[in-house]
Image: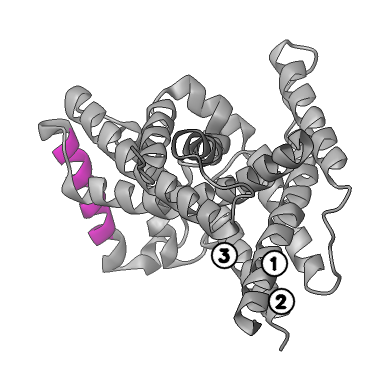
Amino acid sequence: MNKNILFRLMLFLLLLLWMAGIIFPVLTASSQLMIFTPFIKKLYTNVCHQQSYKCFSIGGREFLVCSRCFGLYLGALIASFISLFFKLDSKGLFKYFVLSLIFMFTDIFSYNVGLYAYSKYIASVTGIFSGSILFIYILNQIELHLLTLRLSDEK
Amino acid sequence: MKNKYLPSLVTGFGAAVLVSVPWVRTVGCCIIVPLASLYALMLHIKLNEGEMPIKTSLAILFGLMTGLWAAFFSALFETIITFVIHSNDFVQGLPAMENMLRNSKFVTSFGGLFDQMIKIYHSMANDIRLYGFSPIYTFTVLVGNVIVDSVFGMLGGVLGMTYLNNRSKTVK
């Protein structure tokens, strides 16, 4: 298997694991593993404020990160899945990344000044947009580095 | 004096301080450690007259070091704060969490595991309430911080490298 594809597959699986952790209370609702929820929740406090009213929930079980963070990681997961089949180039993506940040901060500013109530859906959409672009950026940088290493090894 | 590890120590410490402030944590959450990695790279270039363009391996190393320092210091700060106030979000959230677990319709199928885990949670909470310190809790916090902060630190390092390399190209 192509080394790049193997690397992308590994990233995809890691992101999948990370997402599984986020929806851990939902996934383990009918299993004994549910008892480990406090530990897993603690793990995600480092990356998200986990305010209850900002988290998605299914069947009364909240996700372990807020909807914006969930969107960010979901965007990265989607991009990593697409990267398994297509080559994603980060050239010219910078302006879209800036645009996605503008969307995100406009949303944060708007609900903070009271223009509208906090919407989990808007927050997660802004997150998906940024997360996917950010993933493509990071992937390109790491693959570029791996290519440089391979070339220097060949020399 | 050239010191390769000082920038990541300084910015990792700064990130840990910021992460310990509740309001900053709510706003900044996952961007504090990556930003600290970026700043560590900037400091390295300024203090040690580091080479441009920055290599990915160096960026990842700086990100990792920043993440590890941030993990260590934030666990230390949390332990100190918990020791002083004899409470934390785990102790406060335990009754609600226990309620949620007990209300599960599958609780009967848990058998001894459920009671064992609840006992461990309660002993952690009791230790924190009585002495302000629980070794298991501190270990859990440290492990969690190391895993998450090192990954986010490395991501920040790679992104910071892209930004700094692009900026140096523009300046040239």
- Rendered-image quadrant of the N terminus of chain B: top left
Q: CA distance from mark 2 to mark 3?
A: 20 Å
Q: Residue at x 31, y 60 (%)?
A: B114
**Residue B143 appears anywhere in the view:** yes
Q: Residue at x 49, y 49 (%)?
A: B63
Q: Residues within 10 Å of mark 1 (few under 14, many from 20)?
A: some
Q: Is residue B146 covered in magenta?
A: no
SS of the residue at dot 1? helix
- Rendered-image quadrant of the C terminus of chain B: top right
Q: Position of residue B3 (x, y in %)?
A: 35, 43
In the image, B99: left or right of B78?
right
Total number of numbered labels? 3
Q: Which residues are magenta?
A: B115-128
Q: Amino acid at mark 2?
A: Asn
Letter of the chain that mark 1 sits on in the rendering = A
- Give the camera-side residue of B110 and B85: B85
Q: On the image, which quarter does residue A112 sit in? A: top right
In the image, A55: left or right of A87?
left
Q: Earlier in the sequence, mark 2 or mark 1?
A: 2
Q: Which residue is mark 2?
A: A4
Q: Amino acid at mark 1?
A: Glu
Q: CA distance from mark 2 to mark 1?
A: 7 Å
Residue A17's disc is: 3
- Give the camera-side residue of B66 and B148: B66
**Residue A63 appears anywhere in the view:** no
Q: Which residue is mark 1?
A: A143
Q: Position of residue B107 (x, y in %)?
A: 40, 60
Q: Amino acid at mark 3?
A: Leu
SS of the residue at dot 2? helix
